[in-house]
C-alpha cells in the first residue's frame, strides 16, 4: 500500500549565484494505491513522472508532503527494504551492460543481495 499526500518537489532553475528561481516539478501530488492495484502515470515530457518515480524509490528527496508505504513513513520503509526494488529506467541501455547475457543481468542484483547478507547476517 502506498499513500502519497501533497507531495512537493522543485529544482533550482537559475544558473547564477544570485538567481534562486525555483522550477516546481511536483505540486500537491496525492494518490493512494492498495495492495494488488496497478497505477499508470502518464503525462507530457517534463511533467514530473520520472521525478515521482525516483522519489518513491528513495533515489531523490522531496521538499514537502508525506509518503507512506505499508503504513510506514517513506524514509523508514526505504531503509528497512534496501535492495528489494529493481528498476529498469526508460532507456534500458543505461540500466544494464549491453555486453552481458540475460543470465548475467538477472544474476547481478542477486549476487549483490547475497554479498550484503554475508556482511549483515541479520537480513532476512
Image (tube, rainbow, N blue to C red):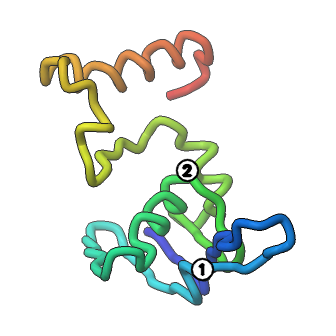
Based on the displayed image, in which of its 4 quarters is residue 48 positioned?
A: bottom left
Query: Residue 113, position in %: x, y?
Result: 44, 22
Left or right: where does residue 84 sit relative to residue 121? left
15 up-or-down from 30: above or below = above
Q: Nearer the viewer, residue 97 or 20?
A: 20
The extreme bottom residue here reads 28
Image quadrant for the N terminus? bottom left
Left or right: where does residue 106 sit relative to residue 108? left
User: Which residue matches tag 2?
Assistant: 59
Query: Residue 79, position in %: x, y?
Result: 63, 44
Which element is circle 2 on? loop
Left or right: where does residue 93 sit relative to residue 51? left
Query: Residue 9, position in %: x, y?
Result: 62, 74
77 up-or-down from 96: above or below = below
Left or right: where does residue 67 sit relative to residue 14? left
Gap in angstroms between the C-alphas marked 2 and 1? 15 Å
The extreme front residue here reads 16
Q: Residues within 10 Å of mark 2 (few under 14, many from 20)?
A: few
Query: Residue 22, position in %: x, y?
Result: 69, 79
47 up-or-down from 28: above or below = above
User: Which residue matches tag 1?
Assistant: 7
Q: Residue at left 70%, top 77%? A: 64
Q: Nearer the viewer, residue 18 or 72?
A: 18
Q: Nearer the viewer, residue 12 or 81?
A: 12
Q: Residue at left 58%, top 49%? A: 78
Q: Residues within 10 Å of mark 1 (few under 14, many from 20)?
A: some
Q: Residue at left 44%, top 81%? A: 32
2 or 1: tag closer to the N-terminus? 1
Based on the displayed image, in which of its 4 quarters is residue 53 positioned?
A: bottom left
Amino acid at each position: 500500500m502506498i499513500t502519497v499526500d501533497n507531495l512537493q518537489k522543485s529544482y533550482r532553475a537559475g544558473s547564477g549565484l544570485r538567481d534562486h528561481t525555483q522550477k516546481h516539478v511536483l505540486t500537491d501530488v496525492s494518490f493512494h494505491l492498495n495492495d494488488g492495484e496497478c497505477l499508470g502515470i502518464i503525462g507530457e515530457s517534463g511533467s514530473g513522472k520520472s521525478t515521482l518515480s525516483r522519489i518513491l524509490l528513495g533515489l531523490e528527496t522531496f521538499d514537502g508532503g508525506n509518503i507512506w508505504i505499508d503504513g510506514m513513513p517513506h524514509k523508514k520503509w526505504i531503509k528497512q527494504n534496501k535492495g528489494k526494488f529493481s528498476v529498469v529506467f526508460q532507456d534500458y541501455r543505461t540500466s544494464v551492460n549491453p555486453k552481458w547475457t540475460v543470465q548475467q543481468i538477472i544474476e547481478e542484483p542477486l549476487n549483490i543481495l547475497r554479498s550484503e547478507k554475508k556482511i549483515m547476517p541479520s537480513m532476512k
